[in-house]
Image (spheres, rainbow, N blue to C red):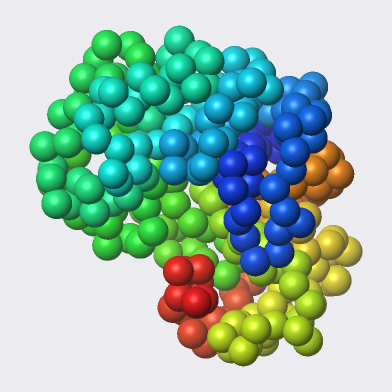
Amino acid sequence: MNGVSKLVLGTVQFGCSYGVNSAGRPDFAEVSRILDLAHASGITTLDTSSAYGDAEQVIGNAGACRFNVVSKYPKGSGNVADAFSLSLARIGVPRLHGYMLHHFELWRENPGIWDDFRRLRDSGLTERIGFSLYSPNELEMLLSAGVDFDLLQFPRNLLDRRFDPYLPGLKGEGVEIHVRSTFLQGLFFMDRNSLPEKLSPLRPSLEQIDSIARDKDLDVSALALAFNLLNPLIDGVLVGVDNCSQLQADIDDSEADCWFDFDIEVSDRALLNPVNWK
Protein backbone atom coordinates (compact mmCIF):
# COMPACT_ATOMS: atom_id res chain seq x y z
CA MET A 1 0.00 0.00 0.00
CA ASN A 2 1.53 3.33 -1.03
CA GLY A 3 1.41 6.49 1.04
CA VAL A 4 -1.39 8.22 -0.82
CA SER A 5 -3.72 5.23 -0.58
CA LYS A 6 -3.35 5.27 3.22
CA LEU A 7 -4.44 8.90 3.46
CA VAL A 8 -7.94 9.39 4.87
CA LEU A 9 -9.48 12.77 4.12
CA GLY A 10 -11.01 14.27 7.25
CA THR A 11 -14.05 16.46 6.66
CA VAL A 12 -14.61 18.34 9.90
CA GLN A 13 -13.33 21.54 8.23
CA PHE A 14 -16.10 21.23 5.63
CA GLY A 15 -18.80 21.62 8.26
CA CYS A 16 -17.27 23.93 10.85
CA SER A 17 -14.08 25.81 11.76
CA TYR A 18 -11.51 23.50 13.31
CA GLY A 19 -7.87 23.48 14.42
CA VAL A 20 -5.52 26.11 15.81
CA ASN A 21 -3.91 26.80 12.44
CA SER A 22 -6.93 26.58 10.13
CA ALA A 23 -7.38 28.93 7.18
CA GLY A 24 -11.14 28.75 7.65
CA ARG A 25 -14.04 26.69 6.36
CA PRO A 26 -13.89 26.22 2.58
CA ASP A 27 -16.90 27.03 0.40
CA PHE A 28 -18.76 24.30 -1.46
CA ALA A 29 -16.92 24.86 -4.74
CA GLU A 30 -13.59 24.34 -3.00
CA VAL A 31 -14.86 21.22 -1.21
CA SER A 32 -15.89 19.81 -4.58
CA ARG A 33 -12.43 20.51 -5.99
CA ILE A 34 -10.82 18.92 -2.93
CA LEU A 35 -12.85 15.73 -3.34
CA ASP A 36 -12.10 15.65 -7.06
CA LEU A 37 -8.37 15.94 -6.36
CA ALA A 38 -8.53 13.31 -3.62
CA HIS A 39 -10.29 10.83 -5.88
CA ALA A 40 -8.00 11.46 -8.82
CA SER A 41 -4.92 11.05 -6.62
CA GLY A 42 -5.90 7.66 -5.20
CA ILE A 43 -7.39 8.60 -1.83
CA THR A 44 -10.23 6.18 -1.20
CA THR A 45 -11.63 7.03 2.24
CA LEU A 46 -13.42 9.98 3.85
CA ASP A 47 -13.90 10.45 7.59
CA THR A 48 -16.89 12.42 8.83
CA SER A 49 -19.49 12.66 11.60
CA SER A 50 -22.95 14.06 12.15
CA ALA A 51 -21.27 16.16 14.85
CA TYR A 52 -19.27 18.09 12.21
CA GLY A 53 -21.89 20.73 11.46
CA ASP A 54 -23.29 20.01 8.00
CA ALA A 55 -20.18 18.17 6.76
CA GLU A 56 -22.11 15.01 5.89
CA GLN A 57 -24.52 16.96 3.70
CA VAL A 58 -21.69 18.91 2.08
CA ILE A 59 -19.66 15.86 1.11
CA GLY A 60 -22.81 14.10 -0.03
CA ASN A 61 -23.54 16.95 -2.43
CA ALA A 62 -19.89 16.97 -3.53
CA GLY A 63 -19.80 13.30 -4.52
CA ALA A 64 -18.89 11.29 -1.44
CA CYS A 65 -20.39 8.23 -3.16
CA ARG A 66 -17.02 7.82 -4.94
CA PHE A 67 -15.32 7.00 -1.63
CA ASN A 68 -15.42 4.61 1.29
CA VAL A 69 -16.98 6.68 4.06
CA VAL A 70 -16.53 6.36 7.81
CA SER A 71 -18.97 8.32 9.97
CA LYS A 72 -19.67 8.53 13.68
CA TYR A 73 -22.50 8.52 16.17
CA PRO A 74 -22.11 11.42 18.63
CA LYS A 75 -23.84 12.05 21.93
CA GLY A 76 -27.28 13.57 21.72
CA SER A 77 -28.14 11.72 18.51
CA GLY A 78 -31.05 9.66 19.81
CA ASN A 79 -31.74 6.21 18.40
CA VAL A 80 -28.63 4.71 16.79
CA ALA A 81 -30.46 3.19 13.82
CA ASP A 82 -32.25 6.46 13.09
CA ALA A 83 -29.06 8.50 13.37
CA PHE A 84 -27.30 6.07 11.05
CA SER A 85 -30.10 6.28 8.48
CA LEU A 86 -29.93 10.07 8.53
CA SER A 87 -26.18 9.93 7.95
CA LEU A 88 -26.66 7.62 4.96
CA ALA A 89 -29.25 9.98 3.50
CA ARG A 90 -27.09 13.07 3.97
CA ILE A 91 -23.96 11.42 2.55
CA GLY A 92 -25.92 9.87 -0.31
CA VAL A 93 -24.61 6.31 0.00
CA PRO A 94 -26.39 2.97 0.54
CA ARG A 95 -23.90 1.76 3.17
CA LEU A 96 -20.82 2.92 5.09
CA HIS A 97 -17.37 1.44 5.29
CA GLY A 98 -17.34 2.15 9.01
CA TYR A 99 -19.48 3.59 11.80
CA MET A 100 -17.91 4.59 15.09
CA LEU A 101 -19.07 5.73 18.49
CA HIS A 102 -17.84 9.31 18.51
CA HIS A 103 -17.82 9.83 22.29
CA PHE A 104 -16.51 6.99 24.44
CA GLU A 105 -18.57 7.99 27.46
CA LEU A 106 -21.70 6.87 25.61
CA TRP A 107 -20.51 3.27 25.80
CA ARG A 108 -19.13 3.65 29.32
CA GLU A 109 -22.49 4.92 30.57
CA ASN A 110 -24.56 2.47 28.50
CA PRO A 111 -22.64 -0.59 27.22
CA GLY A 112 -25.85 -1.93 25.73
CA ILE A 113 -25.61 0.67 22.97
CA TRP A 114 -23.07 -1.61 21.32
CA ASP A 115 -25.85 -4.04 20.43
CA ASP A 116 -27.24 -1.35 18.09
CA PHE A 117 -23.88 -1.11 16.35
CA ARG A 118 -23.65 -4.88 15.98
CA ARG A 119 -27.06 -4.93 14.30
CA LEU A 120 -25.88 -2.37 11.76
CA ARG A 121 -22.86 -4.50 10.91
CA ASP A 122 -24.83 -7.76 10.86
CA SER A 123 -27.35 -6.20 8.46
CA GLY A 124 -24.58 -5.24 6.03
CA LEU A 125 -25.26 -1.51 6.31
CA THR A 126 -21.69 -0.95 7.47
CA GLU A 127 -18.64 -3.12 7.01
CA ARG A 128 -16.98 -2.21 10.30
CA ILE A 129 -17.93 -0.75 13.68
CA GLY A 130 -15.71 0.79 16.28
CA PHE A 131 -14.69 3.68 18.49
CA SER A 132 -13.01 7.04 18.33
CA LEU A 133 -10.69 7.06 21.34
CA TYR A 134 -8.58 9.62 23.18
CA SER A 135 -6.61 7.60 25.72
CA PRO A 136 -5.25 4.06 26.17
CA ASN A 137 -7.36 3.78 29.32
CA GLU A 138 -10.46 3.76 27.14
CA LEU A 139 -9.01 1.00 24.99
CA GLU A 140 -8.13 -1.01 28.10
CA MET A 141 -11.76 -0.82 29.22
CA LEU A 142 -12.97 -2.12 25.85
CA LEU A 143 -10.45 -4.95 25.82
CA SER A 144 -11.29 -5.96 29.38
CA ALA A 145 -14.99 -6.05 28.49
CA GLY A 146 -14.38 -8.16 25.39
CA VAL A 147 -16.08 -5.69 23.04
CA ASP A 148 -15.99 -6.98 19.44
CA PHE A 149 -14.95 -3.85 17.53
CA ASP A 150 -13.09 -4.02 14.22
CA LEU A 151 -12.31 -0.32 13.62
CA LEU A 152 -10.49 2.17 15.85
CA GLN A 153 -9.41 5.77 15.49
CA PHE A 154 -7.05 7.47 17.93
CA PRO A 155 -4.36 10.17 18.03
CA ARG A 156 -0.79 9.41 17.01
CA ASN A 157 1.98 11.77 15.98
CA LEU A 158 5.63 12.61 16.51
CA LEU A 159 4.93 13.61 20.11
CA ASP A 160 2.16 11.17 21.00
CA ARG A 161 2.83 7.41 20.85
CA ARG A 162 0.66 6.30 23.75
CA PHE A 163 -1.23 3.68 21.71
CA ASP A 164 1.86 2.12 20.12
CA PRO A 165 2.12 -0.85 22.54
CA TYR A 166 -1.35 -1.99 21.44
CA LEU A 167 -0.81 -1.84 17.68
CA PRO A 168 0.54 -5.38 17.12
CA GLY A 169 -2.22 -7.02 19.14
CA LEU A 170 -4.96 -5.00 17.47
CA LYS A 171 -3.70 -5.85 14.00
CA GLY A 172 -3.45 -9.48 14.98
CA GLU A 173 -7.17 -9.39 15.77
CA GLY A 174 -8.00 -7.87 12.38
CA VAL A 175 -8.82 -4.40 13.68
CA GLU A 176 -8.57 -1.62 11.09
CA ILE A 177 -6.56 1.23 12.62
CA HIS A 178 -6.94 4.89 11.66
CA VAL A 179 -4.86 7.58 13.34
CA ARG A 180 -5.60 11.28 13.62
CA SER A 181 -3.77 14.38 14.90
CA THR A 182 -0.79 13.66 12.65
CA PHE A 183 -0.03 17.39 12.75
CA LEU A 184 -1.51 17.85 16.25
CA GLN A 185 -4.35 20.00 14.86
CA GLY A 186 -1.89 22.24 13.03
CA LEU A 187 0.31 22.94 16.05
CA PHE A 188 3.37 21.57 14.25
CA PHE A 189 3.12 24.43 11.73
CA MET A 190 2.76 27.31 14.18
CA ASP A 191 5.51 29.90 14.59
CA ARG A 192 7.65 28.68 17.47
CA ASN A 193 8.11 32.28 18.64
CA SER A 194 4.37 33.02 18.68
CA LEU A 195 2.91 30.06 20.55
CA PRO A 196 0.05 30.82 22.95
CA GLU A 197 1.30 30.91 26.53
CA LYS A 198 -0.63 27.74 27.34
CA LEU A 199 1.34 25.86 24.67
CA SER A 200 4.77 27.31 25.39
CA PRO A 201 5.91 24.16 27.29
CA LEU A 202 5.79 22.34 23.94
CA ARG A 203 8.25 24.70 22.27
CA PRO A 204 11.37 22.58 23.02
CA SER A 205 9.63 19.53 21.58
CA LEU A 206 8.61 21.43 18.46
CA GLU A 207 12.16 22.73 18.02
CA GLN A 208 13.43 19.16 18.28
CA ILE A 209 11.03 18.20 15.47
CA ASP A 210 12.47 21.07 13.40
CA SER A 211 15.99 19.79 14.02
CA ILE A 212 15.12 16.22 13.00
CA ALA A 213 13.38 17.46 9.85
CA ARG A 214 16.46 19.46 8.87
CA ASP A 215 18.72 16.47 9.47
CA LYS A 216 16.54 14.32 7.20
CA ASP A 217 16.16 17.09 4.61
CA LEU A 218 12.38 17.08 4.97
CA ASP A 219 9.86 19.71 5.92
CA VAL A 220 7.91 19.15 9.13
CA SER A 221 4.73 18.08 7.34
CA ALA A 222 6.53 15.37 5.36
CA LEU A 223 8.29 14.12 8.49
CA ALA A 224 5.03 13.99 10.46
CA LEU A 225 3.14 12.23 7.69
CA ALA A 226 5.89 9.68 7.08
CA PHE A 227 5.92 8.83 10.78
CA ASN A 228 2.37 7.47 10.47
CA LEU A 229 2.22 6.42 6.82
CA LEU A 230 5.30 4.22 7.02
CA ASN A 231 4.06 2.28 10.03
CA PRO A 232 2.81 -1.03 8.57
CA LEU A 233 0.39 -1.53 11.47
CA ILE A 234 -1.58 1.60 10.56
CA ASP A 235 -4.25 1.38 7.86
CA GLY A 236 -5.38 4.99 7.56
CA VAL A 237 -3.87 8.38 8.34
CA LEU A 238 -6.32 11.27 8.65
CA VAL A 239 -5.48 14.63 7.13
CA GLY A 240 -7.71 17.68 7.24
CA VAL A 241 -7.41 20.44 4.66
CA ASP A 242 -8.98 23.81 3.93
CA ASN A 243 -8.11 23.96 0.23
CA CYS A 244 -6.70 22.01 -2.70
CA SER A 245 -3.21 23.41 -2.23
CA GLN A 246 -3.01 21.89 1.24
CA LEU A 247 -4.25 18.54 -0.01
CA GLN A 248 -1.77 18.54 -2.89
CA ALA A 249 1.02 19.28 -0.40
CA ASP A 250 -0.07 16.30 1.72
CA ILE A 251 -0.17 14.09 -1.37
CA ASP A 252 3.33 15.20 -2.33
CA ASP A 253 4.58 14.73 1.24
CA SER A 254 3.14 11.23 1.40
CA GLU A 255 5.97 10.06 -0.85
CA ALA A 256 8.62 10.83 1.80
CA ASP A 257 10.64 7.84 2.97
CA CYS A 258 12.79 7.99 6.10
CA TRP A 259 13.83 5.88 9.05
CA PHE A 260 12.56 6.82 12.51
CA ASP A 261 15.11 6.18 15.21
CA PHE A 262 14.44 9.09 17.52
CA ASP A 263 12.38 9.91 20.59
CA ILE A 264 11.13 13.40 21.39
CA GLU A 265 10.75 14.51 24.99
CA VAL A 266 7.49 16.19 26.04
CA SER A 267 7.58 18.09 29.33
CA ASP A 268 3.80 18.40 29.78
CA ARG A 269 2.08 15.38 28.25
CA ALA A 270 -1.38 16.71 29.15
CA LEU A 271 -0.89 19.21 26.31
CA LEU A 272 -0.88 16.36 23.79
CA ASN A 273 -4.68 16.43 24.12
CA PRO A 274 -6.06 19.63 22.47
CA VAL A 275 -8.91 19.59 24.97
CA ASN A 276 -6.35 20.90 27.48
CA TRP A 277 -5.29 23.86 25.34
CA LYS A 278 -8.17 26.06 26.46
Residue 255 horizontal side relative to residue 21, left or right: right
**Quadrant in the rendering for residue 187:** bottom right
Q: How many marks?
A: 0
Q: Is residue 196 left or right of residue 217?
A: left
The residue at 50%/14% (across/down) is: 93
Residue 202 in picture, x, y percent from top left: 61, 83
Rendering coords of residue 271 (x, y %): 50, 77
Q: Is residue 265 left or right of residue 224?
A: left
Residue 187 vs residue 212, the one in the foreground:
187
Task: Tell me if residue 216 comes above or below residue 174 in the rendering.
Answer: below
| Up/down of 63 relative to 3, above or below | above
Rendered view: 21 above or below 67: below
Residue 208 falls in image quadrant: bottom right
In depth, the one of 73 and 224 nearer the eye is 73
**Residue 231 seen in this snapshot:** no
**Figure quadrant of residue 1:** top right
Can residue 16 be seen here? yes
Place of residue 224 in the rendered image (x, y in percent of width and height, measured from the top left): 69, 59
Residue beneath the point at 46% across and 38% down: 49
Nearer to the camera, 153 or 81: 81
Q: Residue at x 32, y 50 (%)?
A: 103
- Residue pictured at 24% horizontal, 35% vertical: 78
**Percent position of residue 205, x then y:** 64, 81
